[in-house]
Amino acid sequence: MLPEPLWEYVMDDFDKGLDFKCCKCGQNNHVNIDENDLDFEYSKNAEREMGTEYVYSSYNYLICDNCKKENELEVMIYEYSVGAYNMHTIKVNGKEVK
Ligand SMILES: [Zn+2]
């Protein structure tokens, strides 16, 4: 589970929804992402100077309005040092969108 304070950083980005371009038909889509849509698993990423860095990742599918193709959403949050937010990335089909 993702520690509560880390949620805020990510959900701020999803405040106005998410725009993505379908990888199949090129249609621009706009979706709303809810906390409940994301399911984070964590794993150890690296040992660094100030301790362990953990990464939380969530994988979802976004369905294109036009062709119904599944587009991959990947959200990653890096915690470093322990308990502290470091950075996050949001990718659709492997491309960073935020
Ligand atoms: Zn499409």
Image: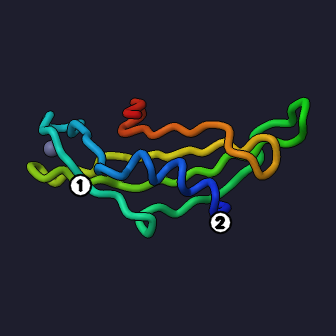
Q: Name the quadrant where ligand 1 sits.
A: top left
Say which amino acid is labelled 2.
Met
At horizontal 15% and vertical 39% (from top left) the residue drawn is 28
Along the horizontal axis of the image, is 22 left or right of 1?
A: left
Mark nearer the N terminus (1 vs 2):
2
- Residue 63 is marked as 1
Say which amino acid is labelled 1.
Ile
Please tell me whether mark 1 or mark 2 is closer to you in this view.
2
Crowd band around label 1 with a 10 angstrom C-alpha radius: few (<14), some (14–19), many (20+)? some
Q: Where residue 32 appears, x then y in whole percent?
A: 28, 57
- Would you place residue 93 above or below residue 40 in this image? above
Q: Where residue 15 appears, x then y in whole percent?
A: 35, 52
Residue at mark 2: C-beta within 8 A of ligand 1:
no
C-alpha gap between disc 1 and disc 2: 25 Å
Along the horizontal axis of the image, is 67 left or right of 39?
A: left
Query: Do the CB atoms of the residues marked 1 and 2 lie less than 8 Å apart?
Result: no
The image quadrant that residue 4 belongs to is bottom right
For the residue labelled by badge 2, is the local secondary structure a helix, a strand or a loop? loop
- Would you place residue 72 above or below residue 7 in this image? above
Q: Where residue 26 appears, x then y in whole percent?
A: 15, 34
At horizontal 35% and vertical 55% (from top left) the residue drawn is 61
